[in-house]
Amino acid sequence: MLSEAEIKSIRNHLEKAQNPLFFFDNDDDGLCAFLLFRRFIERGKGIAIKSFPDLNASYARKIHELKPDYIFILDKPIVSEGFLKEAQDLGLSVVWVDHHDVPFPNLEQFSDVHYFNSMRSEKPSSEPVTYWAYKIAGKKEDLWLALAGCIGDGYLPEFAEEAEKKYPELWRGVSSAFEGLYSTGIGKIARILSFALKDRTSNVVNMMKTMFKATPQDVLLDSKKNLILERFSQINLKYEKLVEKAKLSAGKGKLAYFQYGGDLSISAEIANELSYLFSDKIVVVAYLSGTKANLSLRGKNIKEITLKAIEGIENARGGGHKDATGAQMNVEDLPRFKENIERLIK
Ligand SMILES: [Mn+2]
């Protein structure tokens, strides 16, 4: 876990930054961490990172374009050296907050990059970055947003209990993050935000602007003016069809494997719901796009299984958390990968 000193240090950086640029992982945890910081200092811009697994050098373009005085990187395990060099050449401080179980990055040549990782602190723990952002910003009125980001990342924080009293119509006592995600109002907010990130860039920018000030009621209000919810309903129709198909293909064995194509890259969300429905199974969801496959995997010790299963497969990459990972490979290697998984979990 991050120490009090680390929390204070990040808060100091935020307070010093006059025009910060936040790069965040393209999911609930990344987005909500950014929003909590943005709502705390009321300045700065945010950009969702879509490159995997690293924040690659192409994003340095954004630094030139937006001319920030500070850079924050949230929920990203790897940042390319090229990106950090650009920031350093422009004299910018970089604050990098992560919670992935990765080796300490080599930052020797970068004197102004400040790295914080709850998995690499004195008492290692893997709370989402949103969790820490809530502790750092300390705004009690943003509890709902912090909770949405945490359960979207599969983590049920201790402050969920407070939400029961504060938002009785949006939250209740649940026994897991996923139960909260699929059966409460705050869970719906988490699902709405994660779908909103799938939208085209101009809509994502508008969504973020709305979220700088929004209340939970604003997000959930059923009205034609609520573009975030409108868009959610459209994507959700396609999503629910995919989940129905995925459920049918889950079968009796230990592995629930589902692959699909099309225009909706939503494998992480499908994998989450399958792992909620089939909690004793290993879940693999592959999204096929051209010759590439993007995979989301869930299950006990899935990190170990993922890393073993990609061994020897050329150009395959994978990583993430103990029980939730992502991977990328060529479509033609999927059958072999699936075989490897089956062998490993037998
Ligand atoms: Mn993330």
Image: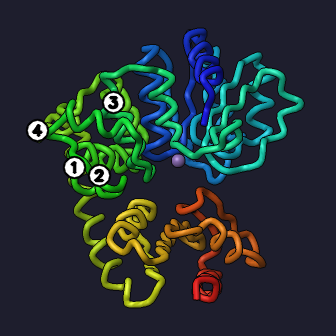
Check disc 1 and give the amino acid type. Answer: Thr
Q: Which mark is residue 184?
A: 1
Q: Which residue is mark 3?
A: 143
Instruction: Please say which color scheme the image uses.
Output: rainbow
**Is 232 or 170 nearer to us in this picture?**
170
**Is 146 or 212 nearer to us in this picture?**
146
Q: Position of residue 34 (x, y in %)?
A: 48, 30
Above or below residue 107? Residue 277 is: below
Q: Relative to residue 56, is residue 139 drawn left or right?
A: left
How far is mark 2 from mark 1, CA to CA?
5 Å
Check disc 2 and give the amino acid type. Answer: Gly
Check disc 4 and give the amino acid type. Answer: Ser
Q: Which SS class for mark 4?
A: loop
Task: Check contact, mark 2 vs mark 1: CB within 8 A.
Answer: yes
Q: Which residue is mark 2?
A: 180
Q: Position of residue 327 (x, y in %)?
A: 61, 65
Q: Which SS class for mark 2?
A: helix
